[in-house]
Amino acid sequence: MSEIEEVQGCCPLDCQDTCAWVATVKDGVVTKVRGAKNHPFTRGGLCAKVRDYEKRTYGEERLLHPLVRIGAKGGSQFQRIGWDEAFSLIAGKFVSIIERYGAQALMPYHYLGSMGMAQRHALMRLFNALGSSQLHGDICGAPGFALGAEGHPIGFDWEEVVQSELIVLWGANLLSTCHHHWHFVKQAQRRGARVISIDPRVTPTTEQSDTHITIRPGTDSLLAAGIVQVMIAEGFLTAESIGRYASDADSFRHYVERCSPDVVSAACDIPVAVVQTLARDIARARPAVFRCGIGPQQSVQGDALVRTLSALAILSGQDQLPGGGLFVAEFPVLHEDRAAAEHLSPGHRRSLDMTRLATNLSDSSMAPPVKALMCWNTNPAVVLSDSGTVKNALAREDLFTVVVEHFVTDTARYADIVLPSTTQLEHFDLLGSWGHAYVTVNHPAIKPRGEARTHGEIMRGLAAALGLTQPELTATDRQIALSALDDSTDVDELLSRGWLQSTRSRVALEPRSLRFSSEFRPPVKTDRFQLLTPKAHHFLNSSFANMPRHRAAEGGPFLEINPDDADELALAEGSLVWVENSQGRVRASIRRVDGMHRKVVALPGKWWGKDDPAGAVSNQLTPSVWSAMGQPAFNDTYVAIVADSRA
């Protein structure tokens, strides 16, 4: 008789939902995963990305053995080696680099391909002990996170949103990027709340909202300031209320005074009446919530948007009401510095901006230069802006690169050593979230396939090869993961139930403690199309872009365009085009979308270039431009659209 077991776990990916799941295991093989019905956020459902996560674990191209490069960098020519040989090669190279250049010539590089405390932070224990360069920066959402670091409230328990009267989704496509948050929006709608989506695109979320305001990308901060201007002009806000919390009240008033409805209308390509009505609706709603998505933050104007939205939420009193205020992100209480054992760091170390990887790898004036790179939980050759320069930097023959991965990604093609990592079904881990306040446990459903190892096992193996003996470098994966828990956590209950809520209190604001003003920047006028590169419905950033089911469901690289713009270019539905600028060109098929903002096009998804080097990676076209808070300005991209003569 077959033995069937159900194992509690959770999704590892960079998503605000962090869904709890149950894996069904039959005779040692995972046959399916389904959402955990008893989890208050997951409620039994999984998204289009992970509803068959087991196929990732059993994928035909899954990495199951360590590899060493035998051909040119970028050529995907590798041969199999054993773990002992891999550890010996890496340790030998690290030691020689440290002896010649110092430990800061080593650069760890990781992001949120897994948000697990062990899978994300275990390897940092090794680099902290070695004294390598540190890492800072955010590929997405940097303005909002920086604002939170200044003391602005950027989140609350999203379950409160059912009490909202007005929900403004500002560039937030919840149904594609974190659809479990939509549960609570729908509850609020059923109770009478209005849902307004502000988005230049037509998305599943805008289609289910009560109102869709199509806005010119990059002008969002001017609309937010215009709303404040109307509220001041019509007596909803006073000079006294602005001065209560703003440390720069005069500058802020001067800023918003320049954003009259006429100015905003012209800049944003929306009617004056829309600006005025939106301001009045927000002023009268009790409460109103402003859900700011990642997309509108990915601009040089993204800093100004989140700052002005914070001012709007605070000055109108929405932030003090249950279900009201600004929502960018919310987190449970976790101490990630413990998981990374940051205390092992030997004194001051330089910190390198992860979003400027190409510069960090190519700058010969850096002292010391980066001579070794170890990459896990991210695919920088696809997800960073100006990907052509990133690949050129990764191609350096004198750069020793180690990539820990599930598949040979575009980045792994440039590695000297590729190490096979376990998937979420094969290891223990603990995850927080950046969209709710639940801590969730992932229990391993099966043993690792082939010779795949957890990041904790890789850390321990490398530490031994390097002769490092600190106790933190012999800790088990479970010890690493659980070290991040707050001291008040009931660990036994967490492990038994599978999840616990760890809600933070709302931020108590000090008088005149926050900066609200921003630099007024009129938008750039251009005859070219503005290109957006939003998340795909079936991919999570670059994850799953190599999976057959996901690729087929997404439909190949396609370019969304307003039908009127398509007609002017004589482009029918499905026409093949080149999307190009001075940095490169990407091949895509036309998708005509009614309601898309004019002169704006969108290329959803972080497609890999491995199978189509001439036309998949949209970040070939995005510029090396950053906001003041360090956000890569992916959406400040301008392109021409040219029919493919081969079509």
Image: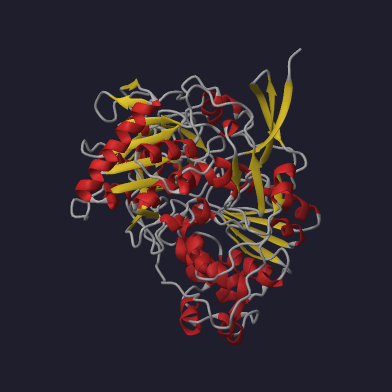
Toward the top, the furthest residue is: 1
Rendered location of residue 241, percent (x, y): 61, 83
Q: In which quarter of the image is the C terminus?
A: top left
Q: How is the image coloured?
A: secondary structure
In the picture, the quarter occupied by the N terminus is top right
Q: Which residue is drawn at 39% across and 52% down?
A: 128
* Residue 102 in view: yes
Q: Give the number of marks.
A: 0
Establish if 280 lies above or below 549: below
Regarding residue 527, the answer to whether it shows in the image is no
**Residue 430 percent coordinates (x, y):** 60, 45
Coordinates of residue 578 in the picture (x, y in percent): 35, 34
Name, please, the residue furthest toward the right. 191
Residue lying at the far bottom in this picture: please name it.
240
Q: Residue at x 29, y 47 (%)?
A: 358
Residue drawn at the location 51% of the way across and 37% of the way down: 592
- Which quadrant of the structure image shows residue 440? top right
Asked if 246 appears above or below 191 in the picture, the reply is below
Q: Measured along the vertical axis of the image, is residue 563 above or below residue 23?
A: below
In the rendered structure, the answer to whether residue 623 lies left or right of residue 544 reads left
Q: Nearer the viewer, residue 20 or 368?
A: 368
* In front of the other: 32 or 326: 32
Q: In this view, does 646 lie to the left or right of 477?
A: left
- Residue 290: x and y in percent read 62, 62
